[in-house]
Amino acid sequence: MALLIRNGLVVTDNSQGVADVLCEGEVISAIGTNLQVPAEAEVLDATGKYVFPGFIDPHTHIHLPFMGAFAKDTYETGTRAALLGGTTTIFDMCCPSRDVQPWEGYQEWRARSEGQACCDYSFHMGVTRFDDDSPGQLRRVVGDGVASFKIFLAYKDALGLGDEGLFRALRLARELGVVTAVHCENATLISELQRELLAVGQTGPAAHHESRPPQVEAEGVHHLMTFAGLTRAPVYIVHLSCREALEEALRGRQRGVDVRIETLIQYLVLDKSLAEQPGFEGAKYVMSPPLRDKANQGILWNALRQGLVDTVATDHAPFDFSDQKALGRDDFTKIPNGIPALSDRIPLLHTHGVLKGRMSLQDLVRTASANTARIFGLFPKKGTIQPGADADLVIYDPEARYTLSAKTHPMNVDYSAFEGWEVQGRAETVTLRGRIVVRNGRHVGSPGDGHFLRRQPSAA
Ligand code: URP
Ligand code: ZN
Ligand code: ZN
């Protein structure tokens, strides 16, 4: 059935204006004023509302075995939460453990998500080992439509890859034309600082930041810039959190490194004082890189507005406070890292970015949708509103107000890092390839609505 969205403020990354949007089948067929209503079309009045392209989260962890725990969302709960927050496509991290070959690991992530997802999704393929079998295995994964890698420089004893693996994986990525997303922190510095802190009895969540200060992240970024420069592989820095790391990335870019930069909604609105609260409360705010000194927030907002930082993600990694974060009650190095935010990213960006004059509506679309589609090979199918694009649309009520809370949020996790925060703006209606999946703020779709998106490497 056709769908006509009338009279909304249609916003893309480079334009905005009041118009009608007609969706036929799975795609947008026309944009204009006073469009004819096709027979049997549903008509939605968007007067006074924004019409955005579906938002895209470039970095989530739905299935994540990590630090002795499993992230709590399933593909059903996580992708439903995404839709309710206006996100219609996620890029989930496929992170197999080192004792599993890449193709086998990838098959596990595919099997878990198949028929379960409520929004569209793709994967970044985690390269957690690199041996003689890896090139053949990774070629096969890329051939199946996963045109990006993910490498951790941190997490030395689990998911992290050493320098030899990093070099070889980047060489392969360059040859295949895939972008490599990289977690940049120096693993040796982290383990040495952790050892010293524990030895002097600093066991609580506040020590997490001390074990991963800005220099640790900046060194990781500098390291990556060197390897990416030498291999000429395109890279994407995930979850950049601070000035020092940004400066290293921009120096790399100035030298000609093909680097894109992601920050997180958490770094834009939360700061390290939250992880320094008395007792164990700070564990809710333990993630890596850590929340930083507040002074970094303005730097990141400015960098987003100026186009120096490309995307805003969530790095959604939901671990319950009651039992999972509690694994690190006596030792901060054992607190599962991550702060859930999948359904909160867009209302927080709207409230703290757009409404506070830190970003325009077009910046919001650029950094939370279009740039991700461009960088990872989905544009213009996703990330914009134009004839022929997938009809993934968000009718956004800019006046709606609600309060973020674990009692009401759709994520499957027992706390909210934003408990009690009031936000303004809500995804009222969301369409996924032309079908309404959120109506009046309620999910009306089903698991299996979401498709796995196959992407082509840029060299192809
Ligand atoms: O603390 C974080 N970021 N947790 C998720 C895993 C990762 O490093 O992306
Ligand atoms: Zn990471
Ligand atoms: Zn992550």
Image: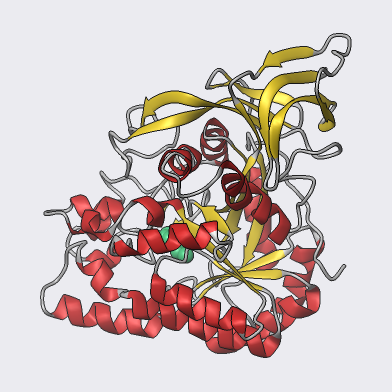
- Left or right of 412? Residue 89 is right
Quarter of the N terminus within the rendering: top right
Depicted 216 relative to depicted 287: above or below = below
Depicted 1 relative to depicted 264: above or below = above
The residue at 19%/50% (across/down) is 281
The residue at 41%/64% (across/down) is 299
The residue at 70%/33% (across/down) is 17
Give the x, y percent position of residue 243. 40, 72
Q: Is residue 449 visible?
A: no
Examine the image and state in which quarter residue 106 appears: bottom right
Examine the image and state in which quarter residue 332 appears: bottom left
Q: Is residue 241 visible?
A: yes
Depicted 188 relative to depicted 448: above or below = below
Give the x, y percent position of residue 162. 52, 84
Name the one closer to the observer, 120 or 155: 120
Give the x, y percent position of residue 406. 33, 33
